[in-house]
């Protein structure tokens, strides 16, 4: 992709600003002073491609809705696209017609690059350049990290990896205890053990449950009985409480009936009467006061006098008073100005007499125009300069004529020089390759070292006995997925076998435990089983059958009796066996718990034995499958003639196999590189020998020269011959330059002579008004001008003084006329002293204005008092009417009678309040009943026996409460144990369970974080290593050449070596010695980073659609020589992709002009004035 045009319609302080990038140039220099908008242009390029951000800081001139950036881009396929970008959330890409374009329209031009990737890979300024140098230092020259950082532009890659490693170790550490994951795992194990300890046996649970339910039912019965007795007590207590209140209410109702005839008055009747009486008296006082004050104000108004004639002349009086000082000053100034005017007139007459001129009426002829005076002075100055210039030129021409003759003789006497262009070309080619011999030696040593390393790796590679050559042709086509599949299958088999072995071990432990428990149970006494009892009863029943047959008289065989009883009698044996059977039954009845336990242990022993047998059968089957799996695994490797190790071991073996294969591949590349260097060495030697022998005879034949010796001899000859060529060129150049200078001086002399002739004509015309002849000196003309100017200045001053005298006289006359006019208006006599008159007028004005203000104030107060009189009279009448209404309501005629009725009304209201209070208490006692129902209950109750019934019920309630308390205590113990068991060993178990769930959730979250960080580190390391393997050789080769050029060959190039950790590190080569990154200066690290960056971009552009490289003043810390080399490298890069170089340094533009032709770059100047038009 390349930019063909950038159009900033409305963005920042740019308006309709266009930058056309010439199609025949790919290296563009954008130069502008500070504040010209360089930073805005940089932002516009990125935001044109990726969108204007929501919080754009470029909307200070144009509103957000009007922001527009446009441009035309093209790709290597010849396609082009013209589009615009507006600010918004969607559809921000517009075509030339203003219609929205799909967001994917730019994909054919940008290689699906994200904005961050574009900024980091294809944008570079002096800050990121310096950061890149620091990144190389932090990585200690690690080849993978250095290449990855330079190619991606991500300068903080080392810090990111260190940060991820640190964060993952802070979460989990093998064998640690303080990291949060370790601590949470320990807590989870403790809580799981605590929860498991809360389990109980089923039989104990049933007994506890029955005891809990029985206690619950007993408590419910006691609570119900308690509630019944308590309700009866409360009913009697309610009757006892209500009885006296009902009696009190009846008494109050009888007393209230006595006040039935008292009229109903307002609740605040007394307060109303008092307020109305006070209002009536206050209003009467106000009427009297207002009337008296009104009379006093009328008397004042009749006495005051206002002179309207004085007030009408207020503005004139104030003007006269303010101008009295000016009047006195003008009188004094007139006399002073008159004396000055007479003095100027005397000076004019003296000067005219000196110059022998006429009268003052002819004064204007001495007024010389300023332009003519400037011309005369200018011609005076030019006269001296022209005379001096002509003399200097004639002297310099004489000296140059001698120098030109001398240089011409030197050129003719200089000998012949040889052309060394071919030799210079050959030497340049050799120098570009650096120390080729040393590089060949190093390559050969590197190849030998790699051979030794590969052989060492093969020596320690298990199950391999062949040579390096045999290994190089070995091609194993087994996928990692296949090996992983076998590993997984083996793991599953082993886990399954281990699981069954653990089951067998568990069952054997249970079997041994059951046998041990059985032995411990039978240690104190023999516990019979059901089989023992059955055998004893069978023996007793067999004897009873023989006895029954004998008792029934049946014939019994003697052998049967002998078999049963032996030598003893049948009766004794039967009796003994019957007793034994009964004893066994008694023992089993009395020791039923132990009998049950023994039976349980026997059942456990039998069950465990059967399960062990089944588990062993399954285990044998699994061992057979394991054997078949191993045969299958060996068959996979059969075609390679290998007896494989386990799948897990062979996975590591394959990794080592691939690693050695990579070493072999790298070794092959180094061998090819070494052969290429040998071929280059031979070609350079032939080219140098041919070029040198063509211009000078050589002492040795071609075969006896080495490249280094030939290069040294050619360099010495080149230096000597170049010095002679330069010396001859310098002499010829000096001769030609001096010859040109001579011609130039001669031409200048002719020009100066012509200028002097023209000066004479101008001078004659300029001095015509001065009455001087042409032979007069320029100094005498200047003196005449000064005399004319002096005379004119005095005349102008005299005229101005006369004007001021007239002005002063007019002011005094006008002021006195105003005084006479105002005296006629106010009727005052003409005074002797005008100043005292003006003062008296001002004082009279002040007095009349004060009288006028007093008159207005007293008139306003009179109106207020009359209004107060009317208000008080109206209010008094209203209060008297309200008082009469109260009299009528109470049926009285006087205020004293109203007060008596108020007292009776207060007593009536007091009784009503007491009745209401008693009724409120009765209603509270009645609760949900009505007061009437409560009264009926009280009347039905025998109050004499109430206390006896109440005492009996309270005694009964006390007994029930004691029984309930004892039941509660007994039930509390059972309930606590029951609730603990049903909830999983109390609330603590529930809390432990919840805490465990919380820990598991937190542990899951932290584990996800740990896995993410570990995976991030692994992926980053793999990515860096992959990029190194793919790009190390081509990028480092190019970067080595660029680095040598950027350092002005103070470094021959770059090489790769191994550090103490056997990691590949990047080193500089200086004077044949290897130099680490940490030993380089800051400037050298910057140049190394730039070399890697440019080499990476070149490789990217070779393999992908080229992307423009945006550079912003990266040469801030470079001197002129290195700046020129850097600019040349950027120009070379522009042959592969477009390069846009921003700068505000004028000297860099000069350097570009010196080091490049005009057809090699495009210069675009941006100035603030043009941008803001």
Image: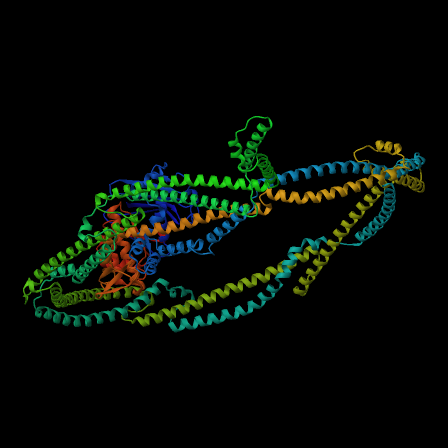
Q: Can the viewer see residue 401?
A: yes
Q: Quadrant of residue 64?
A: top left
Above or below residue 89? Residue 406 is below
Estimate the x, y position of residue 1119 in percent, counting from the top left. 28, 63
Estimate the x, y position of residue 368 in percent, counting from the top left. 37, 64
Above or below residue 193? Residue 549 is above
Q: Is residue 991 left or right of residue 398?
A: right
Residue at left 26%, top 40%? 79
Above or below residue 743? Residue 1133 is above
Q: Quadrant of residue 609?
A: top left
Q: Nearer the viewer, residue 735 or 256?
A: 256
Estimate the x, y position of residue 1015 in percent, counting from the top left. 38, 49
Quarter containing the N terminus: top left
Q: Can the viewer see residue 27?
A: no
Q: Nearer the viewer, residue 162 or 353?
A: 162
Q: Quadrant of residue 901?
A: top right
Above or below residue 711? Residue 606 is above
Residue at left 78%, top 48%? 864
Estimate the x, y position of residue 1146 in percent, counting from the top left. 30, 59
Q: Is residue 943 left or right of residue 840?
A: right
């Amino acid at each position: 992709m390349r930019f063909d045009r950038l159009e900033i319609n409305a963005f920042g302080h740019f308006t309709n600003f266009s930058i056309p990038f010439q199609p025949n140039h790919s290296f563009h220099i954008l130069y502008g002073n500070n504040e010209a908008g360089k930073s805005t242009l940089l932002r516009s390029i990125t935001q044109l491609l990726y969108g204007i951000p929501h919080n754009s800081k470029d909307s200070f001139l144009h509103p957000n809705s009007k922001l527009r950036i446009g441009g035309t881009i093209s790709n290597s396929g010849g396609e082009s696209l013209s589009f615009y970008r507006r600010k918004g959330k969607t559809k921000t890409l517009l075509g030339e017609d203003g219609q929205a374009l799909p967001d994917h329209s730019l994909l054919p031009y940008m290689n699906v690059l994200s904005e961050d990737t574009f900024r980091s890979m294809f944008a570079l300024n002096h800050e990121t350049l310096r950061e890149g140098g620091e990144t190389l230092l932090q990585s200690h020259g690690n080849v993978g990290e250095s290449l990855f950082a330079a190619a991606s532009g991500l300068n903080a890659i080392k810090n990111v990896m260190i940060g991820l490693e640190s964060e993952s170790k802070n979460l989990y550490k093998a064998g640690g205890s303080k990291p949060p994951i370790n601590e949470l795992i320990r807590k989870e194990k403790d809580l799981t053990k605590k929860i498991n300890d809360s389990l109980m046996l089923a039989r104990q649970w049933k007994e506890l449950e029955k005891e809990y339910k029985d206690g619950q039912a007993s408590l419910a019965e006691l609570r119900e009985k308690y509630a019944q007795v308590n309700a009866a007590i409360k009913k009697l207590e309610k009757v006892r409480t209500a009885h006296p209140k009902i009696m009190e209410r009846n008494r109050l109702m009888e007393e209230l009936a006595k006040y039935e005839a008292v009229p109903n008055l307002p609740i605040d009747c007394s307060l109303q009467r008092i307020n109305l009486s006070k209002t009536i008296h206050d209003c009467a006082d106000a009427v009297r006061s207002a009337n008296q004050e009104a009379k006093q104000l009328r008397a004042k108004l009749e006495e005051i006098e206002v002179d309207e004639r004085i007030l009408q002349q207020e503005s004139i009086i104030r003007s006269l008073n303010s101008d009295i000082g000016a009047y006195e000053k003008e009188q004094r100034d007139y006399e002073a100005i008159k004396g000055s005017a007479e003095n100027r007139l005397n000076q004019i007459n003296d000067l005219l007499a000196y110059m022998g001129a006429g009268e003052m009426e002819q004064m204007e002829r001495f007024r010389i125009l300023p332009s003519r005076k400037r011309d005369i002075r200018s011609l005076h100055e030019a006269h001296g300069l022209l005379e001096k210039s002509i003399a200097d030129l004639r002297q310099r021409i004489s000296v140059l004529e001698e120098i030109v003759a001398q240089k011409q003789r030197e050129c003719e006497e200089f000998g012949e020089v040889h052309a060394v262009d071919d030799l210079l070309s050959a030497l340049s080619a050799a120098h570009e390759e650096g120390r080729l011999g040393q590089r060949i030696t190093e390559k050969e040593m590197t190849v030998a070292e790699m051979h030794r390393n590969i052989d060492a790796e093969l020596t320690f590679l298990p199950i391999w006995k062949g040579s390096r050559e045999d290994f190089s042709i070995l091609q194993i086509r087994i996928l990692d997925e296949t090996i992983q599949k076998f590993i997984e299958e083996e793991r599953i088999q082993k886990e399954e076998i281990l699981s069954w072995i653990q089951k067998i071990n568990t069952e054997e432990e249970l079997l041994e435990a059951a046998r041990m428990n059985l032995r411990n149970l039978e240690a104190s006494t023999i516990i019979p089983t059901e089989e023992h009892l059955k055998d004893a009863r069978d023996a007793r029943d067999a004897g009873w059958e023989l006895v029954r047959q004998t008792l029934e008289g049946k014939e019994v065989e003697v052998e049967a009796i002998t078999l049963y009883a032996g030598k003893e009698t049948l009766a004794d044996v039967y009796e003994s066996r019957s007793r034994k059977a009964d004893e066994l039954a008694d023992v089993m009845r009395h020791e039923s718990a132990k009998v049950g336990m023994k039976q349980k242990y026997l059942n456990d022993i039998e069950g465990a034995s059967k399960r062990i047998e089944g588990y062993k059968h399954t285990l044998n089957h699994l061992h057979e499958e394991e054997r078949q799996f191993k045969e299958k695994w060996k068959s996979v490797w059969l075609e390679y003639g290998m007896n494989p190790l386990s799948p897990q071991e062979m996975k590591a073996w394959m990794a080592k196999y691939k690693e050695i294969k990579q070493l072999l591949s790298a070794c092959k590349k180094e061998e090819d590189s070494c052969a290429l260097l040998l071929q280059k060495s031979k070609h350079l030697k032939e080219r140098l020998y041919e070029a040198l022998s063509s211009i000078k005879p050589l002492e040795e034949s071609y075969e006896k020269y080495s490249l280094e010796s030939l290069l040294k001899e050619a360099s010495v000859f080149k230096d000597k011959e170049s010095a002679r060529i330069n010396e001859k060129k310098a002499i010829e150049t000096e001769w030609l330059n001096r010859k040109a200078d001579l011609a130039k001086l001669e031409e200048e002399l002719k020009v100066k002579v012509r200028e002097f002739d023209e000066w004479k004509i101008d001078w004659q015309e300029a001095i015509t008004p001065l009455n001087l002849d042409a032979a007069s000196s320029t100094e005498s003309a200047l003196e005449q001008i000064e005399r004319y100017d002096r005379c004119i200045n005095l005349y102008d001053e005299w005229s101005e003084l006369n004007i001021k005298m007239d002005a002063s006289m007019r002011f005094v006359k006008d002021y006195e006329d105003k005084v006479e006019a105002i005296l006629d208006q106010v009727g005052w006599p003409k005074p002797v002293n005008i100043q005292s008159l003006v003062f008296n007028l001002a004082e009279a004005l002040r007095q009349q204005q004060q009288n006028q203000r007093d008159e207005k104030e007293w008139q306003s107060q009179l109106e207020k008092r009359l209004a107060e009189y009317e208000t008080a009279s109206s209010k008094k009448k209203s209060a008297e009417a309200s008082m009469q209404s109260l009299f009528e309501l109470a049926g009285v005629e006087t205020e004293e009678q109203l007060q008596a009725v108020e007292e009776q009304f207060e007593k009536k209201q007091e009784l009503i309040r007491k009745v209401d209070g008693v009724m409120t208490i009765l209603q509270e006692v009645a609760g949900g009943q009505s007061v009437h129902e409560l009264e009926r209950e009280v009347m039905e109750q025998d109050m004499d026996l109430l206390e006896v019934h109440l005492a009996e019920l309270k005694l009964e309630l006390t007994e029930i409460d004691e029984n309930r308390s004892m039941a509660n205590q007994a039930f509390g113990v059972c309930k606590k144990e029951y609730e603990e068991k049903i909830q999983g060993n109390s609330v603590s178990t529930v809390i432990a369970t919840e805490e465990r769930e919380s820990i598991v959730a937190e542990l899951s979250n932290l584990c996800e974080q740990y896995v993410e960080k570990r995976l991030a580190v692994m992926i980053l390391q793999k990515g860096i290593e992959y990029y190194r393997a793919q790009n190390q050789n081509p990028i480092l080769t190019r970067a080595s050449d660029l680095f040598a050029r950027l350092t002005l060959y103070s470094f021959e190039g770059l090489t790769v070596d191994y550090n103490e950790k056997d990691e590949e590190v990047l080193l500089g080569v200086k004077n044949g010695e290897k130099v680490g990154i940490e030993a380089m200066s800051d400037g050298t690290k910057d140049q190394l980073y730039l070399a890697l960056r440019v080499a990476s971009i070149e490789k990217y552009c070779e393999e992908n659609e080229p992307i423009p490289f945006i550079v912003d003043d990266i040469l801030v810390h470079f001197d002129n020589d290195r700046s020129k080399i850097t600019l040349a490298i950027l120009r070379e890069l522009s042959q592969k992709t477009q390069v846009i170089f921003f700068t505000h340094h004028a000297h860099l533009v000069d350097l570009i002009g010196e080091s490049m032709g005009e057809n090699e770059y495009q210069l675009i100047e941006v100035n603030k004035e043009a941008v803001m038009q």
